[in-house]
Amino acid sequence: MTPRTFHAEADWRARAAAHESRVRAWTDPHQARAARGERHPVHDFLFTYYAHRPAWLRRWHPGPDIGLLGPSAREFLRHQGYREIAGPGGATAVAVDPAALPPERRAFVAWLETLLRGMQARPAFFGCHGLHEWAMVYRQDSAEVRHQAWPLRLPAPEIARLVEANGVTCSHFDAFRFFTPPARPLNRLQPTRESTPALEQRGCLHANMDLYKWSFKLSPFTPAELTADCFALAREIREVDMRASPYDFRALGYAPITIETAAGRAEYEAHQRTFCAQGEPLRALLLAVCTQLLESVSAPGQSAGNPAAA
């Protein structure tokens, strides 16, 4: 993978500074809350569930098409995946090196390319009505509810009636796995980790939120600006996801999306369609990174198990 563009040190340092300034608007409040021992049930999720440290999100990477010039570019050699290359006019530059990918990560990139291509080809589904969060508290003992500090908007019997009357159509395994045991048989699909490439679809809020996960799992080959774009979308989605949940977050300024009503379901679907459209260019860029990587290295050998967690 030969860089198509070389950035002078002043240029790439400006990009790095702009990226850090952008993401600190998200990471600084999270770290301040953590220092005070406080938790935000909406915004902290992207740091705790995805387990990607704020320092890693602030770290700038140029992406696969950029070579970095200047003496400070050698700083990037501390990070796995970089090497020195020949720059213009005999100068030395630093760039990401796809040959540094170990076989298990190559298998992951191939798995992710299959997943993203399948999502592009598969029709989006907008009829789930956000019932996945309700299925996570369906007929559950109150002591086991995840967000103990926040009240439920409806009594438990009404939540149960809503889930049973509408049915659940959740295609996303990482949501389905948190369903309560009695809720799982009510789901029209029974997703597994292995069936993810066959079931993941663009209308799903969580599938679009996961674009952030895929962006940082491709690091350092993902341009940092793309990772930040994916994070920004995931943050918007998380807010809608919690507004449509059975929890009452009005004290935090989040008006509920009342999916128990026809108007609320229509509002939720409108958000789904918006997020689906916003996710399209991000998914295409991530797919392009996967394709570039796979074209730059020998095809990975067949691996056992599911490489999604690589």
Image (tube, helix red, strand yellow):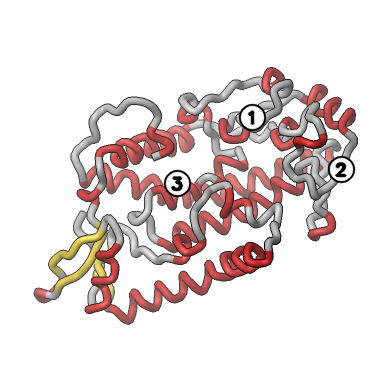
Q: Where is residue 283 in the image (x, y as percent from the top left)?
A: 46, 47
| Three-letter code, disc 2 | Arg
Q: In which quadrant of the rendered view does residue 91 lie?
A: bottom left
Residue toward you, 87 or 46: 46
| Three-letter code, disc 3 | Trp
**Mark 3 → mark 2, Cα distance in angstroms:** 33 Å
Q: In which quadrant of the rendered view does residue 276 lie?
A: top right
Q: Is residue 234 found left or right of 103 in the rendered image?
A: right
SS of the residue under disc 2: loop
Label 2 with label 1: CB-CB less than 8 Å: no
SS of the residue under disc 3: helix
Determine crowd level at label 2: few under 14, some 14-19, many 20+ residues with C-alpha closer than 10 A. some
From this view, report whether residue 1 is shown above or below residue 36: above
From this view, report whether residue 97 is shown above or below residue 73: above
Label 3, on which residue? 214
Determine crowd level at label 3: few under 14, some 14-19, many 20+ residues with C-alpha closer than 10 A. many
Residue toward you, 39 or 291: 39
Determine crowd level at label 1: few under 14, some 14-19, many 20+ residues with C-alpha closer than 10 A. many
Q: Where is residue 305 in the image (x, y as percent from the top left)?
A: 37, 26
Q: Residue 153 carries which label?
A: 2
Q: Position of residue 229 (x, y in %)?
A: 51, 59
- Tag count: 3
Q: Is residue 48 found left or right of 69 in the rendered image?
A: right
Q: Where is residue 66 in the image (x, y as percent from the top left)?
A: 28, 64
**Mark 2 → mark 1, Cα distance in angstroms:** 22 Å
**Residue drawn at point x = 52 percent, y = 50 percent:** 51
Label 1, on which residue? 170
Looking at the rendering, in which quadrant would you find the N terminus? Answer: bottom left
**Residue drawn at point x = 85 percent, y = 46 percent:** 151
Q: Earlier in the sequence, mark 3 or mark 2?
A: 2
Q: Which of marks 3 and 1 is nearer the N terminus?
A: 1
| Three-letter code, disc 1 | Cys
